[in-house]
Image (cartoon, grey):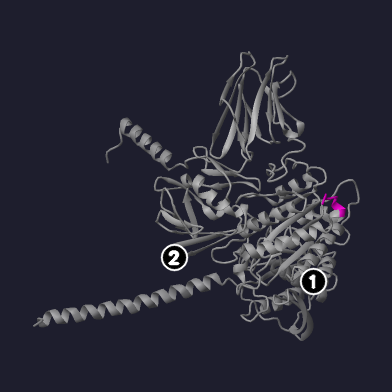
Amino acid sequence: MIPRHLLIGVVVLLVIVLSMGVYLRDVSRAATERQRLAEDNRPVMPPASGPTETVTLFIADDTIGALRSQPAQIPLPEGRQQRAEELLRALLQIYTRPDSPHRLAPAADLRSVYLVDPGDAVVDMNAAFADQHRSGILTEQLTVNSVVQTLAFNVPGINRVRILVEGDTRETLAGHADLTQFFDVNAVTQASTQAAP
Amino acid sequence: MPSATPNTKSSLTVALALLLLAGAPSGEQKKISIYSSVATYNLPVVDRAGHEYVGLLEILEPLGRVSATAAGRRWSLRYNNADCEFVSGKTRGKIRGRDFELPAPFLVENSRGLVPLSSLSTLLPRFLGNSVTFHEAARRLFIGDVAIQVSAQFDVANPPRLVLTFTAPVNPTIATEPGKLKMVFSREPIVLPGNESLSFSNTVITQASFSESNGAAELSIAATAPLMARFSDNGRTITVAAASSGELPSVPSPPEVPAVSGQPVPPPGNPAPAPPPGHPLVIVDPAHGGGERGAALSDTLPEKAVNLGFARLLRAELQGRGFSVLLLREDDETVTLDQRAGIANAAHAAVYISLHADSQGGGVRVCTAMLPPDSSAKGPFRSWNTAQASALPVSQSVASAVLSALQKHQIPARGYSASLRPLNNLLIPAIAVELAPGPNGVSDLASANYQQKAAAAIADGVSSLRDRFGVQP
């Protein structure tokens, strides 16, 4: 026969162990969530306001290995620079969706676009855009071509596009596409036309 | 609080210094050099339980078609038509269905099968059917009759000269230090038929000695005056003599025509050797390497490894079609993009082919440089970033020929242009080839059969322009 006080002691210990288990699980979940939020460094941008306009986005499609043009209705502000930024945000929104034809990291985002006359556009992306980009000549080139063509088609007067990451020059996007130089719009357009299936 | 006495302090300092010395890196990494008629390469050697080990797949990979699978502790390999199976931790395995006893247990680490170095002289002939000579202490392995013999002749002229004659062209690294000139042969299968040391009754050049260690051979010439080495006879003869006044002892220029097969990679900045007449040079560049892994094609397969294996197969295919081939990296080493471009430009090769791999999509992609439409040089100088402009039309012809050949071999292929270095920096026709998965998915990227098929098609494509390159059939 087990003594009564021993039985009570064991039950109390079991309750304490179970409570600790539940507490540890909650703490672990909270830590994971905090880490996830910390890694998601997307800036919180206010939605652009104003009348919507029809624009043409050049979407990279991994299944065909080429760009396809797609009309989209997005609100566009007045200034050229703000329009360029909204265009690229609309593009990135497509790429960060789970069902995207050319997936980029969910945290990939645009920091700014600077338009420098005559005809230069400097696109500043965040670190997640490049750090978590898939590596490969074609996949990286499709991203570059998509950014360059979408900008050049919808913002008149852009002849060359440079891509920076967190305000700095990055050697390559993910090991292949050379980001140290300006991309010539005509060369990219010609290449995309030739590559179309 | 008690303060430390000077004695205690010095003891602590000594102890700390000893600890730091013990923790310091043990120096040069152990490696084995393998010389064969197909390729010359070196591989890292690891120490396990008092034995030296090397990867079996890595040894056989440059020599033929090879694939390996690891299932638990069992590790099997297929080399051409020979199968073998080993079990991790066991010494007994099977090669071509017959038992084989290793001198130390077989090991499997990260799916790599490791065999003891001391087994190579008996193990490799079972696969290769060739004689194998292994200088185990120096870790130099000779497959077949590939050794380059060296003979020395002393000429008591004024100034006195030591004439070293080799049975094949050589391109050693030469260094001078007070009283000595050293030639290190890291890629040539140099052997000395006679004595390892020769003494001369001369007041200037006193001794020549031969030694070998850690996968390299070294010829050291002792002298009382600064020495100078000169190459002649297409790299088959090196004449060592005292430097005349005003002439600095220095590293000489590489020979004009060195080895054809398995050519050594020239040091960055030095020109690559000229190919023999009628055998135009193709530069095959396995992209990435060393700390730069490239794309992660699977959890265990980095792009750099696929590129190197693919490059070796392509080299064999091109050599079989009459081309000389220079691989820009033979091992898992870091070569910068500027170094790759520098070597390729200096070599005046007929074609440059950069090899890549991607786990997305399928088939093979061939790309040329993407340049602004008006990139041609407007003066005597060419821009580094658009150096490819003048060669781009020929590069596009090469790409078209390779695409046609791939399609003829029923490999899905497509062409495009990309902003990819070092293509933009090359003065010679240049293409990049990206190997994507075949019908069996990503596993095809590591498959010797799939790579072989693609390599044969690419070589056919390049070869179809043989008239332009002047290849002797």
The kind of secondary structure element at disc 2 is loop
Q: Is residue A182 visible?
A: no
Describe residue B279's horizontal placement relative to residue B327 as left or right: right
Task: Indicate the position of residue B284 as horizontal and vertical percent values.
Answer: 72, 53
Q: How packed is label 1: few (under 14 Cα within 10 Å), some, or many (20 or more)?
A: some
Describe residue B63's horizontal placement relative to residue A68 as left or right: left
Q: Is residue B444 above or below residue B100?
A: below
Q: Which residues are magenta?
A: B467-473
Question: Residue B245 versus residue B332: which sits nearer the camera?
Answer: B332
Residue occupying the point 73% across, 66% down = B365
Q: Is residue B118 above or below residue B65?
A: above
Check the image and name the residue furthest to the front.
Answer: B98
Describe residue A168's horizontal placement relative to residue B110 as left or right: right
Q: Amino acid at mark 2?
A: Gly
Task: Indicate the position of residue A115 as horizontal and vertical percent values.
Answer: 78, 67
What chain letter is assigned to the residue under label 1?
A: A
Q: Is residue B112 visible?
A: yes
What chain letter is assigned to the residue under label 2?
A: B
Residue occupying the point 84% across, 69% down = A190
Nearest to viewer (mark 2 / mark 1): 2
Task: Indicate the position of residue B360 as horizontal and vertical percent values.
Answer: 65, 71
Check the image and name the residue furthest to the right.
Answer: B378
Q: How packed is label 2: few (under 14 Cα within 10 Å), some, or many (20 or more)?
A: few
Label number found at residue B72 = 2
Q: Would you name the residue on which mark 1 appears?
A: A195
Task: Indicate the position of residue B307 as horizontal and vertical percent values.
Answer: 65, 58
Describe residue B273's horizontal placement relative to residue B209 as left or right: right
